[in-house]
Amino acid sequence: MNRVDVLIKKTYYVYTRFNIQATFALLYHDEALSVENLSEFIRVSDQLIELDENHYFIIFAFTSEENAYKAAQNIIHKLDNQLNNTTSCIALDTFDVAKTPQNVLNRLKQILFETRKNSYTRIEMEDILDRK
C-alpha cells in the first residue's frame, strides 16, 4: 500500500503542478498474472503495481476517463485472447485530488466488487455505486 500511496500522491502533484490528469484503475483476474506479462498490455507511460496475486493497480497517466475506458477495453480484449478466458474485469474511478490514496483504493475495490457481481459487464466506473 505504501507504494500505491506514493504513486497516487505523485499523480496528484503532477496534476496540481501541470494540470495533467490521470485515471486510476483496479484490474482483477482469477488466476495469478506476472507483472511482466501484464505490462505488455499497458502503455509505457502507465504505472502497474501488483497488490496481490489477483489484483493489480493501474495508473493511466495523461488519460481522461473516456480514454482510460478505451484502454481498459483493450487490456481486457488482449487478456481474453492470450489467456483464452473471460475472468478479467477492471474498475475505474474519477480523478479527484480531494480523495486520499486509501479512499481511491477503497472506491476501486467497491466498484470492482459490484462489477464482479454482474457478469454482463467487465469494465465499470464509479457510477455503478449509484445504481445499487
Image (tube, rainbow, N blue to C red):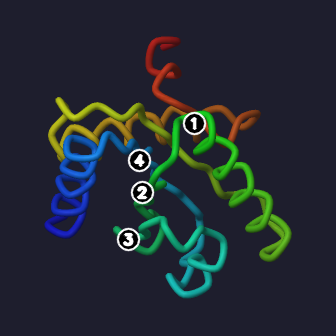
Residue occupying the point 25% across, 51% down: 14
At x 24% / y 53%, what residue is drawn? 8
Q: Which residue is mark 1?
A: 115
Above or below: residue 43 compared with residue 131: below
Q: Residue at x 52, y 22 (%)?
A: 128
Q: Which residue is mark 4?
A: 24
Residue position marked by numbered label 2 in the rendering: 59
Indicate the position of residue 44 as horizontal and vertical percent values: 54, 74
In the rendering, which numbered label is found on residue 93? none
- Amino acid type of disc 1? Thr
Amino acid on which the number 4 mark rests in the picture:
Phe
How far apart marks 2 and 3 lie (CA) works out to 9 Å
Q: Quadrant of residue 55?
A: bottom left
Spatial CA span between label 3 and label 4: 12 Å
Circle 2 SS class: strand
Q: Nearer the viewer, mark 1 or mark 3?
A: 3
Q: Residues within 10 Å of mark 4 (few under 14, many from 20)?
A: many
**Residue in front for this viewpoint, 28 or 2:** 2
Horizontally, residue 6 falls left or right of residue 48, namely: left
Of discs 1 and 2, which sits in the foreground? 2
* Residue 52 locus on image (x, y percent): 37, 71
- Disc number lying in front (1 or 4): 4
Residue identifier under label 3: 49
